[in-house]
Amino acid sequence: MSVRLVADTSIAARHFFVGVWITTVSLLKSERSERHATLKHNFLEVETMLKLGVRCLVLAGMMQFGNFALAQAPSLPSPSCEAYDAHSMRQVQVERGQRRPIIDGVGWVFGIPRKVLLWDSRANNHSVSDETVCEVSSYLEHRGLVDTKVRVNQYAPADEWRRLVNNQQIGAGWKYTAGTWKWLGYTILPGRIFGNDEYNPFTNSVYLYSDMPTMGLAEAAYAKDVSERNRPGTYAVVQSLPLVALWHETLATDEVINYISIHGSTEQIEKVRHDLYSRYGLETAGTVGQVLPDGSGLFSIVGAVSGHVVAARENSSQNR
């Protein structure tokens, strides 16, 4: 485990310093005409980033120790994933993106805030294991959502456009307005670099960028929620509105906990609850931040911490 810890921290270091290098070059180029006046300021910014990077690497190491401790505790059985192999998912459509170390390294750096807030180095790590994919796919199979596409760390705007056009569950009015807007966001700001795990109801696709089964299950649960609506397009648009989105986040959180209590998971239930509640806190902060953008950073911290506290209390009460 110590070797794995060193390896994970080494990878984190390489990814971080790739980001620092890119940022440094862009800063120097953009300020070339005023190099002498702003050079000191640029180096101060780089120095600040390096200090932040050191702190994040320390946090990553602490999280690896935390994950090691959690791994020693017994987890719920997950029969559907114990015998997993690459050909076991006969129905659910799964596609993996090709390996792009530099792009994924930049994405890893952009994911640092979420790693810290969720207190898990697997968040937005752009290295999704077969076990995580298996859990999400198994859930979709159990719920009969075999038409849902699972994209694992993949950027595929052309194929997503085809899925948008061919999605018969969404009316044309919503597909070519809100659906097109969503597709443009996916295309211009690719989740492989900037995004989080997400379900796109207009293309009926789940995007996985984290090696955290509960994050993917929460998005798959939203897919189930949308599929059960009489007007899924209208429901998806309404759920994208500020504050209203808390409704489907609440339903998805409850659905995942209920599902795992029956079918099990590769994670222990305390860890599942911890991840889900901290995620719920972040999502709450995100929707509040749409109304009050000036405090979005503070809201994210408060939301994540609140989720950790509530999960710890509930886990403590369950263990008594």
Image (tube, rainbow, N blue to C red):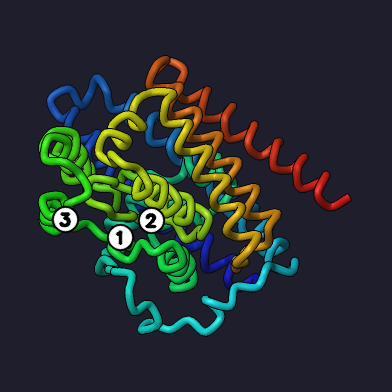
Q: Name the residue under label 1.
A: 148
- Find numbered disc 2 in the image and state the secondary structure of the residue it sits on: loop
Name the amino acid, label 1. Answer: Thr
Residue 243 falls in image quadrant: top left
Q: Which residue: 65% across, 52% down?
A: 62
Q: Can residue 109 be seen in this view?
A: no
Query: Image quadrant for the N terminus?
Result: bottom right
Q: What element carries label 1?
A: loop
**Above or below: residue 214 compared with residue 91:** above
User: Mark 1 to mark 3: distance in Å?
Assistant: 10 Å
Compared across the picture, whether 181 is left or right of 119 comes to: left
Q: What residue type is labelled 2?
A: Tyr
Q: Position of residue 135 (x, y in %)?
A: 49, 67
Percent position of residue 28, x then y: 22, 35
Q: Which of marks 2 and 1 is nearer the N terminus?
A: 1
Which residue occupies the extreme right position in the image?
320
Q: How many labels does the image show?
A: 3
Q: How crowded is mark 2: few (under 14 residues within 10 Å), some or many (20 or more)?
A: many
For residue 209, the mark is: 2
Q: Report the residue marked by disc 3.
A: 163
Give the mark toward the camera: 2 or 1: 1
Question: Is 190 placed left or right of 299 in the picture?
Answer: left
In three-dimensional space, the C-alpha distance between marks 3 and 2, rounded to whole angstroms, equals: 20 Å
The quadrant where residue 254 appears: top right
Q: Which residue is drawn at 56% across and 80% down?
A: 82
Above or below: residue 110 compared with residue 239:
below
Is residue 269 left or right of 171 when viewed as pictured?
right
The amino acid type, in three-letter code, at marker 3 is: Arg
Residue at 65% over, 49% down: 273
